[in-house]
Amino acid sequence: GFWSQAVYSASDLFNLYRTVLLRSPEEIPVCEADGGDLVKNGPSKELRKARLGYMLAAFALRAIRSIQVLIEMDAFNRKGSKYALQICTRIELVKLALKIFLRLKMPFNFYVDEVAIEDAEPPKLLEQQRNQLLGQQNGNSETANAESAAPAPKPEPFVGRRTGRSLKALENLEGAPPEPEASRPPPPRVADGLRRDCTPHSAQIAVAEVLYHSRPLIHLALLRSRGRKSWAAWIVALLLERLSAGLLGMELRSMPNSRARLLEAAEVSRRQNLTFWALVRSPVFDKFLKRPTDVLDWILKKIPVINMFNIVELFLVLQPFYFSTSGS
């Protein structure tokens, strides 16, 4: 179980490097504090520093998530369950500090996780959009070059109908001012408008944020005092998750058909989906789902080839650990 999780963590870290560190700076959800014109002036020094800080903190948070199960397993093997829960509490405090830092950098009025941003805007989709934009720009430049290279038609003289006199055609003046070009749309700045279009701050959002971010710490405190199979810890964690997601969903008032609405709705959906992790936490899993899962694992072990990729067996090994089902 440990080495299987180690392989998964290594592959996840490689994907994080590709999706977080190699993306365009304009895609990072960080805006100018005063709403400056990025098209004319370009990103300021403060904005570049904010983007860099956000990118490093987001990568650190997701890297911790990739290896947190390994750290818990190592602590459990060395000093037992209580020590492992203490280590989990320390990791959650570090993650909370990173989330607060990211929240301060964001233009939103509540925390929007990188997982939600990636779900709403997959890296492949953004890459396709950039390639399409570059193709359009190249096509426009080639068309403009072809039109400029084509010889201008020679003006013909004007011949009157009654008199039959011919008048010399007027030549184009070289010094004439060129016609004003049609205003081109500004280049896509993915983070532009987020601060203007996002959900306004309210007391209900503040309460939802406090409940959401305090849930892991309260859950761990109850697990340490009552044990990993405590019904009280399970019920309190589920109530905090459902209440925070419900309050946040009712207060969602961002601009329709905007990027802010897309990202905020993805975060609300992510928090609502996290509540389903409660079904695979102890003691509910041990009471209702463990026996059917053992039967499924036994069946898969009897099937050739499939038994080499038995995910159910790996899940049964990792299920007792906190970070396997925490969703944080």
Image (cartoon, rainbow, N blue to C red):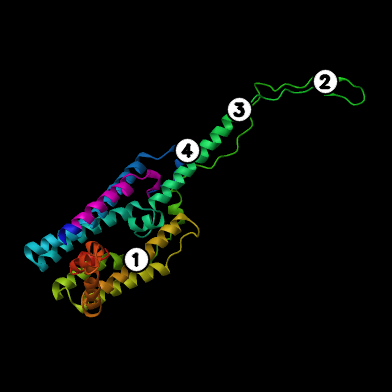
Residue at numbered disc 3: 148
Q: Decide which of 286, 269 is in the foreground and name it.
A: 286
Instruction: Name the residue: 44% across, 58% down.
Output: 262
Marks 1/3 in contact by CB < 8 Å: the verdict is no
- How many C-alpha atoms fall within 10 Å of the one at disc 1: few (<14), some, or many (≥20)? many
Nearest-to-viewer mark from 3 and 4: 3
Residue at numbered disc 4: 40
Report, in whole angstroms, how far the alpha carbon at label 4 lies from the one at label 2.
Answer: 48 Å
- How many C-alpha atoms fall within 10 Å of the one at disc 4: few (<14), some, or many (≥20)? few
Q: Secondary structure at mark 4?
A: helix
- How many C-alpha atoms fall within 10 Å of the one at disc 2: few (<14), some, or many (≥20)? few
Is residue 70 a member of the stretch shown in magenta? no
Q: Decide which of 98, 117 is in the foreground and name it.
A: 117
21 left or right, relative to 166: left
Q: Which mark is residue 271?
A: 1
Residue 326: x percent and y percent?
A: 24, 66
Q: Decide which of 257, 286 is in the foreground and name it.
A: 286
Nearest-to-viewer mark from 3 and 2: 3
Residue 285: x percent and y percent?
A: 23, 75
Marks 1/4 in contact by CB < 8 Å: the verdict is no
Is residue 24 a member of the stretch shown in magenta? yes
Q: Which residues are magenta?
A: 5-28
Report, in whole angstroms, how far the alpha carbon at label 3 lies from the one at label 2.
Answer: 28 Å
Magenta span main SS: helix
Nearest-to-viewer mark from 1 and 3: 3
Along the polypeptide, which appears first: circle 1 or circle 3? 3
Does residue 46 sit above or below 104 in this rendering?
above
Q: Secondary structure at mark 2?
A: strand
Instruction: Name the residue: 23% across, 71% down.
Output: 297
Q: Decide which of 61, 290 is in the foreground and name it.
A: 290
Displayed quadrant of residue 321? bottom left
